[in-house]
Image (cartoon, rainbow, N blue to C red):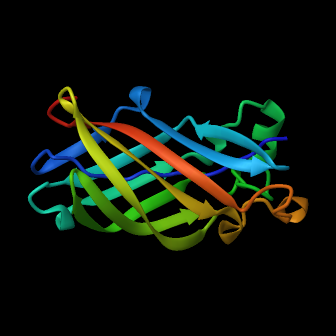
């Protein structure tokens, strides 16, 4: 049975003082993990982003990304149902996984280090990701990846806490199309 997690994304855009809106039809939040030594992957179908960014003052930017954990799609209906249960995302109790930035630092070449708090199942940890940004027509494409340890967030308890069965590390990759509110 496949499963798994997590989310998130981040921000940046070379548009001055832009409030940016996610185009979910042209965006993706996916993840990769290992189960019983085999590679597996999935994605989340529902998420939103609130991004405010000024390329002249990236440190003043702010990003909030919310993911609906019940929208997980592993490609296996039984795995999706298992992921909703209490031992995984407990989607009846926790309807949102959330990242909120605390700092954005330019690295050059359209890349930024975005640091913030990731909260899943009521558990929060500080994390960062390197996000790259490139123009795509009138919009901006934000893409990056990060790794997280699922057990740090209480994801996959009981028999699933055995990391030889379900690896602890989950690689999250995101590709987000961000539109200026004036463009949308």
Quadrant in which residue 154 is drawn: bottom right
Q: Position of residue 6 (x, y in %)?
A: 59, 52
Left or right, 161 with respect to 54, comes to: right
Q: Is residue 105 visible?
A: yes
Q: Is residue 123 left or right of residue 145?
A: right
Taking the image as shown, residue 42 lies to the left or right of residue 179, namely: right
Task: Tell me: residue 175, above or below residue 37.
Answer: above
Q: Residue 114 or 88: which is nearer the viewer? A: 114
Look at 62% across and 47% down and name the residue there. Answer: 69
From the top left corner, tell me how far across and down residue 165 is, in percent.
Answer: 86, 56
Q: Residue 181 at what x, y percent from top left?
A: 19, 37
Q: Is residue 12 above or below residue 129?
A: above
Residue at position x 55%, y 72% from top?
124
- Could you tell me which residue is drawn at 40 percent across and 27 percent down? 26
Quadrant for the C terminus, please.
top left
Instruction: Please name whichever residue, 79 or 148, is drawn nearer the observer in this view of the structure.
Output: 148
- The x, y position of residue 67, in whole percent, is 52, 48
């Amino acid at each position: 049975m496949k499963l798994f997690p997590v989310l998130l994304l981040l921000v940046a855009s070379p548009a001055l003082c832009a409030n940016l809106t996610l185009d979910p039809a042209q965006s993706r939040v996916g993840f990769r993990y290992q189960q019983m030594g085999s590679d597996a992957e999935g994605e989340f179908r529902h998420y939103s982003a609130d991004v405010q960014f000024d390329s002249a003052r990236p440190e003043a930017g702010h990003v909030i990304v919310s993911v609906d954990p019940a929208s997980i799609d592993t490609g296996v209906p039984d795995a999706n149902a298992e992921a909703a249960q209490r031992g995984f995302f407990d989607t009846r109790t926790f309807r949102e996984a959330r990242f909120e930035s605390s700092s954005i630092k330019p690295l050059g070449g359209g890349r930024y280090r975005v640091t913030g708090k990731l909260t899943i199942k009521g558990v929060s940890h500080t994390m960062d990701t390197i996000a790259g940004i490139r123009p795509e027509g009138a919009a901006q494409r934000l893409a990056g990846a990060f790794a997280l340890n699922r057990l740090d967030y209480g994801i996959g308890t009981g028999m699933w806490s055995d990391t030889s069965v379900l690896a602890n590390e989950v690689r999250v990759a995101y590709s987000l199309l961000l539109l200026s509110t004036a463009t949308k």
